[in-house]
Amino acid sequence: MRLGYACTNMTLTNRPKKLGGRITTSRTLRQASWQPTWDLHRVGELALANATDLLEYLKWNDEHRITLFRVGSEIVPWHDHFELTDLPQYEELSEALMKAGDYAREHGHRLTTHPGPFHVLGSPTQDVVERSIVSLERHSEVFDLMGFEPSHENKINIHIGGAYGNHEGTAVRWIEGYNRLSDACRARLVIENDDKNSMYSVRMLYDLFHRVVGMPITFDYHHHMFHPDGLDEYEALQMAADTWPSDVRQCTHYSECRTHEKQRDFEEMIQKQGLSLNEVQEWPELAKIKHNIDKIRKQAHSDYIYDEIRTYGMDFDIVVEAKAKELAVLHYRHIYPKSETKVYNERQREYTKTA
DNA sequence: ATAGGTCAAGCGAGG
DNA sequence: CCTCGCTTGACCTAT
């Protein structure tokens, strides 16, 4: 298996000033401080700084043997409100993105992206669909500027995101929107199972989308628990595996419940104080902490991951979605030193050879 | 310098 | 009707 993480590197983002300061690909601005003047120069500055730091991220990743990374959507902030070529720094931005892309190719890194839950191609609100299309095209253009050929290798991963009580009808509408995307964007688009019983399971994605237009499916372990739809984990993983083209590694998402993590931490904490769980009610402060933990949604991600990822002997890519980001990957390697297999090491050598 | 509140986009669950 | 949670910290204002 190959492990990656999403969007933010805690180590670099929080780097103290005396060690060189913050490195981040997520600089942005608040609407109120920008929109009244529509200062594209300011936006371009931020985008250029983000793109420049992306290369620093990739170097850090490479030093830590992490070759799978999700690029955050905000690398070009507000990108759906203008054309990339409108930015005064367009040339410099292109160069910085291409440098990052070149580095990724030379070192065998896979870069992906995951536009947010506001990209809803099946929405009944026409304006939502229009804005979704523009934004998806921007994501695709950024990968173009990095020099990537359109492929699911560099996937643009979205959810269907709303079923409106009618899975089939919404799927038809969604596909109409999908068909309006550019060839390049469609060649990158991948769909992921939702984290709600009322939305789309892996099986539904397969039947209503993959069968019809053939895009691959990202299997998300955590989301699958909320809508198994009659498939156990292995069956769903397999069904998703079938949707990936033979020359592109399957990509999956892995996360664990924040609730469980915090409950374990809490129990450990009170045990250290010599208390038992049923005594907690007698201490108002402890009871309040416990109450807040119980309120955490089951969909929320933990800081770290603790279980060994169940790959069933298969070899594929896994984006770890954990709040501690790259630290969660390093921690996972620490507790399961043999989890990343020989298969992956062989692939690493292939990458090195072709580079 | 830092703490705390706030922030673009859609949807559905839960209180 | 409000808050949370999701791809996310970063921005902004007040101290």
Image: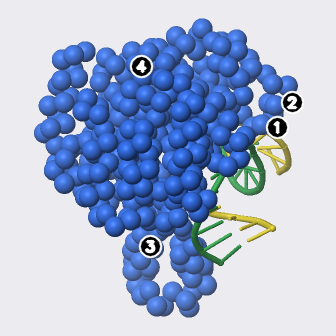
Chain colours: A blue, B green, C yellow
Q: Residue at 13% across / 39% down in the picture?
A: A342
Q: Is residue A24 visible?
A: no
Q: Which of the marked residues, 4 or 3, is nearer the chain's N terminus?
A: 4
The residue beneath circle 4 is A148
Q: Could you tell me which secondary element the residue under label 1 belongs to?
A: helix
The residue carrying pointer 3 sits among few (fewer than 14), some (14 to 19) or many (20 or more) residues within 10 Å by Cα, namely some
The residue carrying pointer 4 sits among few (fewer than 14), some (14 to 19) or many (20 or more) residues within 10 Å by Cα, namely some
On residue A32, the disc is 1
Three-letter amino acid code at the position of disc 1: Ala
The residue at the far top in this view is A91
Q: Disc 3 to disc 2, how far (Cα)?
A: 46 Å
Q: Residue at 57% across / 39% down in the picture?
A: A176
Q: Could you tell me which secondary element the residue under label 2 belongs to?
A: loop
> Could you tell me if the residues under marks 4 and 3 are in contact, i.e. CB atoms within 8 Å?
no
Chain containing mark 3: A
The residue beneath circle 3 is A263
Mark closer to the observer (3, 2): 2
Q: Is residue A132 visible?
A: yes
Mark closer to the observer (4, 1): 4
Q: Which of the marked residues, 3 or 2, is nearer the chain's N terminus?
A: 2
The residue beneath circle 2 is A36
